Amino acid sequence: METANGIRRDNIAIGITVVVSINAFITYLLTMAPSIPFWDCGEFIACSYTLGVAHPPGTPLFILIGRLFMVFVPFLNNLAERVNFISVLTSSLAVGLSCLIVLKILRAWFKEKSALYPYNLLIYLGGIAAGLYLTYSSTFWFSAVEAEVYGTAMFVMQFIVYLSFLWYENIGKPARWRYILLIYYLAFLSIAIHMTVFLVVPAIFIFMIFSDKSLAKDWRFWTVGLLVMLASADFKYFIIAALLIIIVGFYFAFIAKGPGLWKLAFMVAVLAVIGFSVHLYIPIRSMGNPYLDMNDPETVQRFTYFMERQQYGDKSMLESLFTRKGSWGNQFGNFHNLGFWFFFKDQFSGSGLALLPLLIGLLGVIVSLWKDFKRGGFLTLLLLAGTIGLILYMNFSDGLHGDRLEVRDRDYFFTPGFLYFAMYIGIGVAGLGHFLYDHIFSGKNFAKIACLIPAIFMILLSLFHTAPAHWRSHDRTGIYVPEEYAYNMLNSCKPNAILFTNGDNDTYPLWCAQLVNHVRTDVRVMNLSLLNTDWYILQHKNQFGIPIPLEDDQIRWSFHHDEAGNLLMTPAKPFVDPVTKQKKYLTPNRMNVKAEMVRMIIMENNWKAPIYLAATVGDDVLDVAKKFLSRNGMVYEVTPEEHNMKFDVSITDSLLDKVYKYTNLNNPNVGLGQTDLAMSVTYPETYISLSEQILAEGDTTGAIERLEKANENFPYYFRTAIKLKQLYTSTNRADQGLQVVQKAAEAVAYKARRYPDEKFWHMFLSPLYLESGKTLEAIASFERTLAIDPDEPMVLNNLLTAYKKTGQKDKGVKLLEWWKKNYPNDQYVQQLYSFFRPQFR
């Protein structure tokens, strides 16, 4: 009977795990990105197709998996979708494993009661709750529908954690050694997906030495722990230590016939090296000179710098840990882009319900430590490592302490922490039910039903609140902005052009479009951020025929350190500046390398190939040829004649109206994320700039026509509607202008209702309300923007003006004082304070 019950219980647990995984799979498949996403995804997709070398630390295993999915997933026509599908599959498997681990933990805690009602039902409900809250959690879902490494990393990480619990159950049995070996092999292999997976390994080591006294007392196992620490701290020392352990371990294990743990230390080191050896893909592929060969890591020195991520700064992340780049309050609090609470507060719920999942999860932590300190302590270590540990280690910059503000939301780094907290929500609901049944409702007739209510409520909350609240904001269906942004920019160029782009989002999609979709492969794309490096300059000079008038020795850097320990990069030979006739070294320590290279390439090219700069390029580079730039849609063309950055109206009209694609940008039911919105605004802004130029030339009708086209293609952009209203008013059509603004306000208000947590819709809506004379409604939208992101400076001036206009002095003073306190060194904030503060007395 017990055996039969045991099998039945296991089958139910497996069935629940499968159902939860399928639910996650369907959710992610339905909301998966249909093409190229922004940020690193375009690079990963392109590298998967070409077997290229991605940016450090390279993620070679993910690239290889991506290539396999491109070949063996024929039911998805779009190659980018096939790589996106990796995240859909692995993320849903990670959800299933998380559910299974929670079920295993709860069953172990309840012991013999786990077969009895209502304890068995509490166990199952706890596992379901954990799986559902993870499925619908914001950060996990966001990465689960695009070609990112985090879904795959979380799957491997959870599999390793699951193996750790199996090891615990086999302490004292021969099988435990096999689990240890498999755990460490997968851990070192997974570094080739993302270093995040390795986050769990120190916790596993601590779990093992506290659970198995024989390991705790053996110094050889501690040597294995040292290997783990070195792997996470220093690439060179890890390799040296691993080889040393292999040599010494082999001698004592097989020659001197030492104790059995010598074999364990030897095998762990061997498997660590075997697992890590997938990184050899990087220098091997680099020697083949693929199109995408980031950092050119084909030599030992360059491969070492590649693995140590030297391109991100002279100091290692471990060294920079002790120089805080942001205040504790901002790094832990509600600060936009990086604050932990900023990301956590709506992670498991819609707006306003953050406290409930938080309390249930914290209850789960208490329950786990109370019921089984070893298992619970292990899980708590994982949670702390993925939250507080990462806050300390990543040390994100808030822009107020000398370092640049983080350029994008950094919530994805906390994915492990959010995952383990979701598991704790499941543990918490089971623990609460247990407490209610055994202590609060003990002996009551309704106890068996009442104890289930919290778990059922939390499950229903995830299904009918969290899932709907996050669905629209995470649904990528119908979003083609990155793919079409690349298509449009490439098709802005003449044949065989050289195109300079600025950063990640105006480059990675272009790489993907060219290499995977074979769009305008004749255009040579040069990324200005990478043009600051010697390897990239050499690559484009020697492989792609970019006209660069320097010898290789005038470009290639040698690495050395100054007396302060700062890394310096200097070529062996100087070059002679053709303008000043002075000798100079091409080094970022002494000049703006990218601007210098653009100047050299333009001069050396001598009009042989068309040269373009993306409109996103910064002024420091545009100034190189400012007088000779002609604006053609999304790009500037370098011309022999002076155009002073003015539009070529004929070319731009043709591009905007006949060439560019704008799929679903006027669709009210397609939700664009912040990056999609920010990049798609390029189009209406181009129309606006074009209309301003035409208006300055005296053609009011032509200016209105361009704005009307912009408003038709992008009916949600406030500046288009406001500019159009101004021109209508200036031509005695004030009523028509007011109608345009009101119609735009209605369209944006629909978007704001449909996507209430997307701050840009509220930011777009506020000025439209102001133009419509609805000041109070505008204030409400401004305030909603700040409720979503308290540190959004773009609304500050308008909101203060609106407060002044409506006599809301107390609100104005409160807002000013908050900004002055939080941004004491921001000149713009201080100017606003000086201007408005006397007016609120």
Image: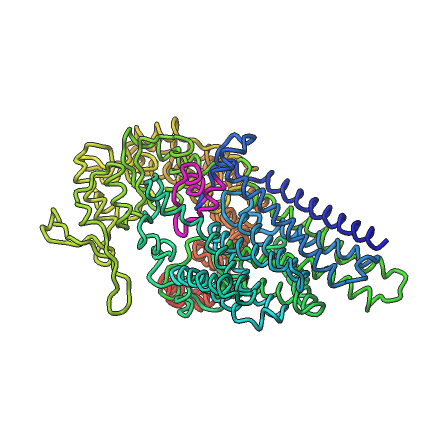
Which image quadrant is residue 585 in? bottom left
Residue 587 position, x and y percent, is 22, 55
As rendered, which of 821 and 37 lies closer to the eye? 37
In the image: residue 250, left or right of residue 612: right
As rendered, which of 675 and 169 lies closer to the eye? 169
As rendered, which of 469 and 510 lies closer to the eye? 510
Is 461 rendered above or below residue 208? above
Residue 667 position, x and y percent, is 53, 35
Residue 398 appears in the picture as rendered:
no
Which residue is most to the right?
445
As rendered, which of 730 and 500 lies closer to the eye? 500
In the image: residue 319, left or right of residue 22: left
Decide whether residue 65 is among the magenta residues.
Answer: yes
* Main SS of residues in magenta: helix
Residue 419 appears in the picture as rendered:
yes
- Residue sitting at 33 percent across and 61 percent down? 314
Residue 30 position, x and y percent, is 60, 38
Is 56 rendered above or below residue 105? above
Boundaries of the magenta span: 41-66
Residue 796 position, x and y percent, is 45, 57
Decide whether residue 533 is among the magenta residues.
Answer: no
